[in-house]
Image (cartoon, grey):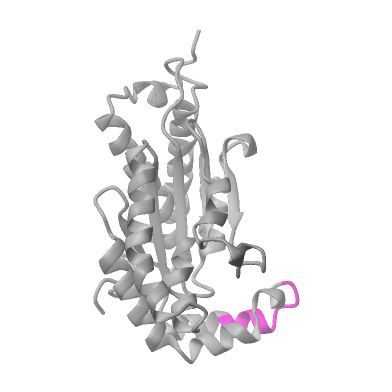
Amino acid sequence: MGHLGSASPPYEISKKKAEARLAAAQERLLRLRLLVGGQIGPKKIGPPLCVVFEGWDASGKGGAIKRLVAPLDPRHVRVSQFAAPTYDEKRHHFLQRFWTVLPGWGGMAVLDRSWYGRVLVERVEGFATGEQWKRAYDEIAEFERTLTSEGMILIKFWMHVSDEEQLKRFESRRTDPLRQWKLTDEDWRNREKRADYEAAVEEMIERTDRPKARWHVIAGDDKPYARLAVVEKVCHVLERKLEKRGYDLRAADHGEQTE
C-alpha cells in the first residue's frame, strides 16, 4: 500500500518488553530535552523541536503524545491540538494559525494535527477548492523549509491503523461512557471515505517528505509498539541532528550540570 505499508509492527515485542524500552526511551528524551534547553551541559539553548502528529481517527495519536511528553517538565513542552478553523481563522491564509504555537530556541512543541489538514480533510471533504489544496503542497514545503533553515528540528508522524483495527476501536469507544466523547458522527462518515483518504495520505507523503522534514509512518495496530516507536524515533532523530551540529551528547548521557 505505497508509503503506508502494513499496519503490523515490523517485529514482534511483548507488552512487558515494550514498556521497559519505552521507559528507557523516555528517560533518554528527558536528558536530551534538558540538554537542548540549557539545563544540563553547556550554557546554551539548542534548536527548537516540533513534533507533528497526523493519522487516522482512533489511530493512537493521543496515547503516543501522552507517552512522549510524560517525562518532560510542563514548562519545557507545549501540546497544541487543531480542529476545524474558526470563522476568523478562515479569513487568513491557512498557515497563519499555526505560527503562534511553534517553539522558539530551546523549546519543544507537539502538534495534534497540523497544517496538513489542507491536503487531507479539507481536500476530501471539499472544504478547500481543488486549486487551493493542490497549491498547498508547495506552500507547506516552503513553510517547512523556512522553519528548518532557521534551525528547527521537525519530526512528522503518520499514525497508521488497519481498517479492521479502527472499527474495533470505534466499537470500544461507543460502549465506554468515559470515551464516548471521542467518537462522533463525522468519524463514522470518514470511515466510508477511507479509500479517498488513503489516496490523499499517499500523495501528501510523496510530495512533502523532504530530507529536513521526513515523514515517519508508525504501525499503530499494536499500541505498546506504536508508543515505543514514536519516543525512540524522536530520540534517534534528535540525537542525529544534534550530533551534526556539533553537540557533545555525553552531557545528556551523564546528566552533567552546568556550573
> 254 and 211: which one is in front?
211
Q: Residue 23, image x and y in percent?
A: 48, 45
Q: In this orientation, does residue 113 appear?
A: yes
Res 222 → quadrant: bottom left
The stretch of residues the image draws in magenta is 170-178
Is 248 placed left or right of 38 in the picture? left
| Residue at the extreme right | 177
- Whole-percent x, y for residue 143 in the image: 39, 52
Q: Is residue 251 above or below residue 125?
A: above
Q: Is residue 10 visible?
A: no
Q: Residue furthest top?
A: 259
The residue drawn where x is 45% and y is 55% is 52
Q: Is residue 205 magenta?
A: no
Residue 86: image location, x then y, percent: 66, 67
- The residue sitting at the bottom extreme is 192
Relative to 73, is 32 on the left or the right?
A: left
Question: Which residue is drawn at the image coordinates 55% and 89% (left, top)?
Answer: 189
Q: Is residue 18 left or right of residue 202?
A: right
Picture coordinates of residue 42 (x, y %)?
Answer: 42, 16
Q: Nearer the viewer, residue 38 or 127?
A: 127
Image quadrant in which the N terminus is located: bottom left
> Where 99 falls versus 58 (above or below)?
above
Q: Is residue 13 left or right of residue 5?
A: right
The residue depicted at 44 percent of the width and 41 percent of the height is: 49
Residue pictured at 62% horizontal, 81% vertical: 172
Count of marks overlaid on the render: 0
Front residue of this view, candidates 101 and 164: 101
Q: Is residue 171 magenta?
A: yes
